Amino acid sequence: MHLSRYFLPVLRETPKEAEIVSHQYMLRAGMVKQASAGIYSWLPMGLRVLNKIADIVREEQNRAGAIEVLMPTIQSADLWRESGRYDDYGKEMLRIQDRQERDMLYGPTNEELITQIFRDSVKSYRDLPRNLYHIQWKFRDEIRPRFGVMRGREFLMKDAYSFDLSEEDGRKSYNRMFAAYLRTFARMGLKSIPMNAETGPIGGDLSHEFIILAETGESQVYGHQDLFDGDIPPADLDFYGDLTPVVDQWTSLYAATDEMHDAARFEAEVPADKQVSARGIEVGHIFFFGTKYSDPMGCRVQTPDGDMANIQMGSYGVGISRLAGAIIEACHDDKGIKWPVPVAPFEVGLINLKAGDEGTDTACGAVYEQFTNAGIEILYDDTNERAGGKFATMDLIGLPYQIVIGPKGLKDGQAEVTDRQTGAQESISLDTVANVIAKRVKQQRLLV
């Protein structure tokens, strides 16, 4: 993509309303634009990131055996009355009426709707287990939307729902999502730590939040250092095998947010040199709640003995739009964003220091074509902006590799390459720079 033809409304100054780094950089880098309080339009650069995050989430859900569906954003209030949650949920739920004065709502979550779908479609134990997921926009009327996409009112979310015959099988489904989440966040360049969590309005007695460390995190978290050095489940993991060892590995050591923290237990269980106390951001949340929804809504199947049994259920959420901000909170410096390759809007940024000069135009054009032919996503700054402005923009938007070609380098047959993550700089021959960097990018696309 040529920058001269792209829509990238960068801001040089930090908007006054932006309180945290991710909000500041998302606005300045032209990723989002506020439409109203807590609601954002996603501009081209931001949408590319959003789609890449969604693709990784989708791939890992599919790998774990979940099946994609798509449910509507507007739901009938009658379903929520069946479960008993309509009056209990609170003012975060946006309640509306259609022209027939039927009570409707803008879905904050989908337990009721997916239970109805399954109840009306599956009658036999032979059709279990199943896990259905979708990626859809949701709305929760936060009383104080703030921090940009980190705590907005409208957000993109992946939510999955498991259906099993027995509690034992339900916990196996829970373990599959537990392992899938570890892989999902690792593929985005994040180390997530599962921590025991409150179930809140979702319900149930088993729940884990997946937390990433960031200085601007919303929660104080406490844990054993070995968890932060733990091994991520491999790509060839058998999701239908025994995943208990994986779950035990990540739950046997102390890990808690401030809401669940037990200071005495922390001091007793974790050696002083292994104690971690830091700020963290929730990026995923999983629940097992048994028959909380299937019982009141009559979601039952026939058992092998011919009896009828309520289905055991769980739900599993990932805040996809929230992750765009969370990744920035974990990956930035004072110049801008530092995107990991798998979620970067473009993988390479090419800067022509003298656009309009025949020599640099030709050299940049050749390098651009080589990257494109190699399947690398490249943003080519071919504008007449001054050099300092070009460097500032590239640092701000945070593409993993920056390649600079100017008259001096052209004379020496060299391109200057900067690794945005590490800051390392090197000179590489114009003849080989595309092959060298393309190889690195492809190795980093799949981090685990």
Image (spheres, rainbow, N blue to C red):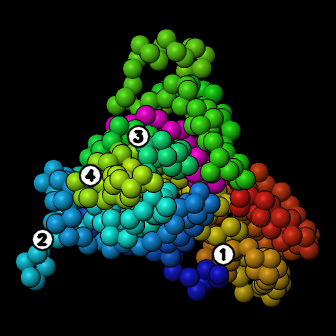
**Mark 1: secondary structure:** strand
Q: CA distance from mark 1 to mark 4?
A: 53 Å
Checking the image for residue 295, the label placed there is: 4
Residue at position x 39%, y 20% in the image: 262
Circle 3 sits on which residue?
A: 207
Q: Nearer the viewer, mark 2 or mark 1?
A: 2
Question: What amino acid does circle 2 point to?
Answer: Asp
Which of the two discs, 2 and 1, labels the residue nearer the N terminus?
2
Question: Few, some or many C-alpha atoms within 10 Å of disc 1 (few <14, some 14-19, many ≥20)?
Answer: many
Say which of 192 and 392 sits in front.
Answer: 192
Say which of 163 and 66 sits in front.
Answer: 163
Instruction: Let me know if residue 189 is in the magenta part.
Output: yes
**Mark 3: secondary structure:** strand
Q: Nearer the viewer, mark 3 or mark 1?
A: 3
Q: Is residue 436 above or below residue 269?
A: below
**Mark 4: secondary structure:** helix
Circle 1 sits on which residue?
A: 379
Marks 3,1: beta carbons within 8 A: no
Residue at position x 83%, y 64% in the image: 439
